[in-house]
Image (tube, rainbow, N blue to C red):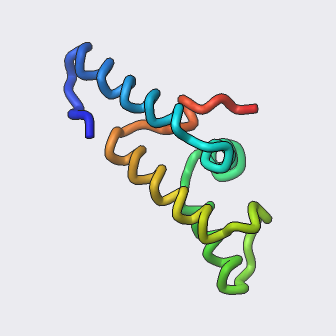
Amino acid sequence: MAEKTKNKLGKTAVKHDVSDYVKTLSEEYRMLVVLKAQLYGGNWEPMLDDLRNRLTGKPYIFKLANRIQDDIERIEQMQKFEHDHNVDLADYVEMQ
């Protein structure tokens, strides 16, 4: 994990870590980042709530993917990365 420092070099290192991480994201991950930004106001929690509600048969807002459990795991992984690096991946993933 990159250390968060206030000097320019530290910020560059964090940006590099984020850029490297974003390059590894598959289309499924990228789609989740785009949906988070465009449909859920940039927040993971409402999206996770929708997916979990769908799994348990409760009302949900959007039909997202057939691989709900996989999407939940992807979101949790990206949510942790964002928290650890204090970034929003939507700032780094091209919205198509």
- Does residue 15 sit above or below 30 in this rendering? above
Q: Residue at x 48, y 38 (%)?
A: 88
Q: In this figure, what is the number of numbered marks? A: 0
Image quarter in which the C terminus is found: top right
Q: Residue at x 30, y 23 (%)?
A: 13
Q: Residue at x 72, y 85 (%)?
A: 57
> Where does residue 7 sit, x and y in percent of width and height?
20, 17
Give the farthest residue toward the top.
8
- Does residue 40 sit above or below 16 in this rendering? below
> Where does residue 83 sit, x and y in percent of width and height?
37, 47
Image quarter in which the N terminus is found: top left
Q: Left or right of 18: which side holds 95?
A: right
- Does residue 81 sit above or below 51 in this rendering? above
Q: Quadrant of residue 8?
A: top left
Q: Quadrant of residue 4?
A: top left
Q: Residue at x 38, y 24 (%)?
A: 16
Q: Left or right of 2: which side holds 53?
A: right
Give the farthest residue toward the right.
63
Q: Nearer the viewer, residue 81 or 43?
A: 81
> Where does residue 79 sit, x and y in percent of width and height?
45, 52
Give the farthest residue toward the bottom.
57
Q: Left or right of 75: which side holds 31?
A: right
Q: Left or right of 50: which side holds 72?
A: left
